[in-house]
Image (cartoon, rainbow, N blue to C red):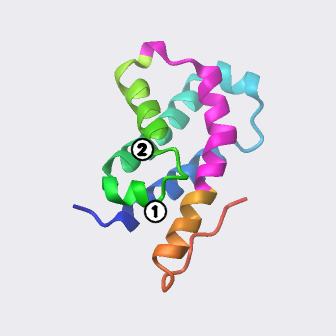
Amino acid sequence: MRREKLYLSDIVEAADAVAVFLSGVERGRFLQDDLLRSAVLQKLSIIGEAAARLPKEFRARHADVEWQDIVAFRNIAVHAYFAVQWSIVWTTATQDVPALRQQVARILAAEYPDDTPPKSLF
């Protein structure tokens, strides 16, 4: 099993990619751009998959993070793709993901203090 640090790093990297993809993008453009929507949804799926692979004990230690919601979002995105509500994806990507990135960066800094914490792209 991969160390928790690697899954957390995957979450930060995917969140950073979402931020880059959506930099300067308005909601209307996002809703009309299939390529952009697909790219963002893929990164959100990576975030959900990484969260799902974190051990239950680890998630319990960091119960302030909505791990179950993150995993549930990924499951809907992957298994019910045609039911995806893009306005919810937009809100998730622009509001929830930046907050999650901050939480995970704090966890990384607390759990692995000898490592350089990831810096935000923005």
Image point 62% across, 24% down: which residue? Answer: 88
For the C terminus, which image quadrant?
bottom right
Toward the top, the furthest residue is 83
Q: Is residue 55 magenta?
A: no
Residue 119 percent location from the top left of the image: 63, 69
47 relative to 92 in the view: left or right:
left
Q: CA gap, disc 1 to disc 2?
A: 11 Å
Image point 54% across, 74% down: which residue? Answer: 109
Q: Type of residue at label 1?
A: Ser
Secondary structure beneath label 2 = helix
107 relative to 121 in the view: left or right:
left
Query: How many residues crowd mark 2 within 10 Å: few (<14), some (14–19), many (20+)?
Result: many
Give the magenta part as a residue range: 82-101
- Labelled disc at residue 59: none
Asked whether the residues under the numbered discs 1 and 2 touch, taking CB atoms below 8 Å apart as contact, a structural biologist would say: no
Secondary structure beneath label 1 = helix
Residue 29 lies, with reference to residue 45, above or below; the image says above
Label 2, on which residue?
A: 46
Label 1, on which residue?
A: 9
For the N terminus, which image quadrant?
bottom left
Image point 56% across, 17% down: which residue? Answer: 85
Residue 21 percent location from the top left of the image: 63, 43
Q: Which comes sooner in the sequence, label 1 or label 2? A: 1
